[in-house]
Image (spheres, rainbow, N blue to C red):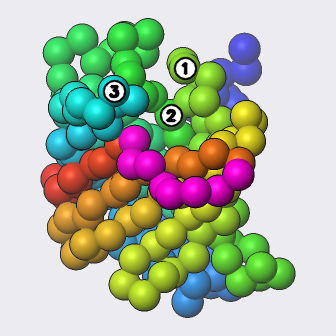
């Protein structure tokens, strides 16, 4: 392994802010930069719920052209959180502005559970809505709602390929910690 490249990866990856060419569009997600703790509510198929705790961490990467985050349930501060196999969720999202769409391309990967998603993200009034279709043809929608400088409510929903009503599968009630 080349130790020079290994040492330089964080320097090459991280950026202090958005690139100038997307600065105006970056406001949609830019407020997320920092560290968040979350109360998690999972809506199970049998109609019950399960609760937990998680964390999310956001920043600019690739010369400020991409917003990247890490989501983790349980959060990194929880006991045993360093064992990814014990996590219910341990993934990263890339948000890349596409001027042709005037929207954000969203790519999520959870390499522990092998969950992958592609979406398109846009403002919807005061909210942010990201929509896509997973590998099984299930439509998914992720929404940031009740957004303030120090909190947000994130809602994950699915519906089958034929349409129908959206079914809530998870909610995150996030608070900024840094």
Q: Quadrant of residue 103 in the image?
A: bottom right
Report if the CB atoms under discs 2 and 1 are less than 8 Å apart.
Answer: yes
The residue carrying mark 3 is 46
Q: Which residues are magenta?
A: 162-169
Asked if the magenta segment contains residue 168, the reply would be yes
> On the rendered image, what quadrant is the N terminus found in?
top right
Query: Looking at the image, is mark 1 or mark 3 earlier in the sequence?
Result: 3
- Pointer 3: residues within 10 angstroms few (<14), some, or many (20+)? few
- Do the residues bearing badges 1 and 3 touch, measured as CB atoms within 8 Å? no
Contact check, label 2 and label 3, Cβ < 8 Å: no
Name which quarter of the figure residue 51 lies in: top left
Q: Is residue 77 above or below residue 132?
A: above
In the rendering, at what x and y percent does residue 49 appear?
Answer: 23, 32
Q: Which residue is mark 2?
A: 91
Residue plotted at (37% across, 19% down): 87
Q: How many marks?
A: 3
**Residue 27 x %, y %:** 47, 81
Q: CA distance from mark 1 to mark 3?
A: 21 Å
The location of residue 63, given as percent across then percent down, is: 64, 64
């Amino acid at each position: 392994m080349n130790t020079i490249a290994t040492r330089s990866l964080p320097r090459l990856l991280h950026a202090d802010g958005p690139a100038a060419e997307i600065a105006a569009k970056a406001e949609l997600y830019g407020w997320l930069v920092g560290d968040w703790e979350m109360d998690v509510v999972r809506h199970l198929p049998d109609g019950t719920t399960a609760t937990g705790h998680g964390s999310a961490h956001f920043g600019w990467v690739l010369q400020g052209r991409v917003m990247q985050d890490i989501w983790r349930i349980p959060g990194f501060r929880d006991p045993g959180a360093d064992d990814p196999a014990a996590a219910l969720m341990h993934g990263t999202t890339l948000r890349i502005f596409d001027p042709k769409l005037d929207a954000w391309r969203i790519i999520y990967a959870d390499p522990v559970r092998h969950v992958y998603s592609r979406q398109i993200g846009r403002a919807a009034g005061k909210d942010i809505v990201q929509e896509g279709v997973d590998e099984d043809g299930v439509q998914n929608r992720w929404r940031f709602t009740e957004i303030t400088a120090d909190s947000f409510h994130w809602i994950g929903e699915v519906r089958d390929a034929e349409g129908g009503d959206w079914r809530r599968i998870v909610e995150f009630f996030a608070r900024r910690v840094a």
